[in-house]
Image (spheres, grey):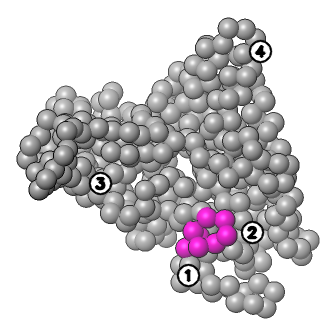
Amino acid sequence: MLHNFAGNIEMYGILDAIASGPVEALSSENSTMVGVGMSMEGIEQNPIVYDLMSEMAFRHKNIDVKAWVGLYSMRRYGKSIPLIQDAWNILYHTVYNCTDGSYDKNRDVIVAFPDVDPFFISSPHKMHYCFGKPISRGASLREQKDSHDQPHLCFHLILCTFCGTFCTILRYDLVDLTRQALAKYANQLFLDVIEAYQLNDVQEVALLSERFLELVDDLDLLLACHDGFLLGPWLESAKQLAQDEEQEKQFEWNARTQVTMWFDNTEEEASLLRDYGNKYWSGLLQDYYGPRAGLYFKYLIESLENGHVFPLKDWRREWIKLTNDWQKRRNTFPVESVGDALSLACLLYEKYLRSPGINYLDH
């Protein structure tokens, strides 16, 4: 099983396929199958996917996945909690049975920002005009020159269910679920910014841009509530391998480069492997992803105010410089979590996801 590339953080999987594929391969005519294995570029996400796949090495019959998921939640939390079991059942029928054929789920705007002229960013079922020429917004962003996947919105809001009952081990799942919901909301919010830009509404662009950046800051606070979503341990673990000061600088630079832009860029051309190893980590959002988005929004607003086309080369140049400078920095980040995950998750749910007019779940 190859489930994840680059250790990206995204809730997704196809549990039905995992529960039947190995058994069908083993029992097929002339089968030469000798075992079950996993080969992924990154782990430490989607534990339910790896738990089920590991179990399939010892199974000779297909699994009743709904029943297995119910037992999984009991094993995970140490007791039967009906609300939580209901929540996992919803997750099983949505994000953990994504059958859209896309192998790389995590191309959210926050962690994989589109390096593209804003008039080439499309949203479904709308038509706008640029310099008198119609621009279709019905095509997916992946059809454009610079591919950037639209969000995979096979997600149903169940945060309120998780908030109903809480224990220590739920903290990771609560943070991860809230992160996922807010990341998808951020995708929609970004498209709203672009739509306002294409309509030449500079005030709306400025307002929505501020909301987007505020959301990034709030997400950073949420991720700080669990050790599994921190940038600090990643950098410190790299530095601890060093034998002298020069090695420490090099190893930290390597660690910072791996999760941002790989070092084959020029001053005006970003690496094709930018954001390949992107992570939803506290510290990375506030210190890198947020400032990067802020640069893009700055150029959006300036181009409207000055009546000029979007200066794509200028944006790229400043973004690449920001990245190179960030990779060379030596500032430290927390290695232990802080904050109350339950209280903050409920607060963010009320702030962003309960508001009227939010319809991203209908996509």
Q: Circle 3 is placed at which residue position?
A: 14
Callout 2, which amino acid?
Asp
Q: Amino acid at mark 1?
A: Gly
Looking at the rendered structure, which numbered label has been put on residue 246?
A: 4
Name the residue carrying label 1: 138
The residue depicted at 75 percent of the width and 44 percent of the height is 264
| Element under disc 4 | helix
The quarter of the image holding the N terminus is top left
Q: Quadrant of residue 345?
A: top left
Real-space CA distance between mark 2 and mark 4, rounded to the nearest whole angstrom = 40 Å
User: Which residue does the image show at 9% across and 43% down from the upper left?
Assistant: 60
- Please state which amino acid type lies under the numbered disc 4: Glu
Q: What is the CA distance from the residue labelled 1 to the residue labelled 3?
A: 28 Å
Work out whether residue 65 can be spotted.
no
**Precedes in sequence: disc 4 or disc 1:** 1
Q: Which mark is residue 117?
A: 2
Q: Secondary structure at mark 2?
A: loop
Separation of disc 4 and disc 1 at Cα? 51 Å
- Residue furthest to the left in view is 61
Q: Residue furthest right?
A: 306
Q: Earlier in the sequence, mark 1 or mark 3?
A: 3
Q: Position of residue 2 (x, y in %)?
A: 38, 46
> Looking at the image, is mark 2 or mark 4 earlier in the sequence?
2
Mark 2 and 1 residues: CB-CB less than 8 Å, in contact? no
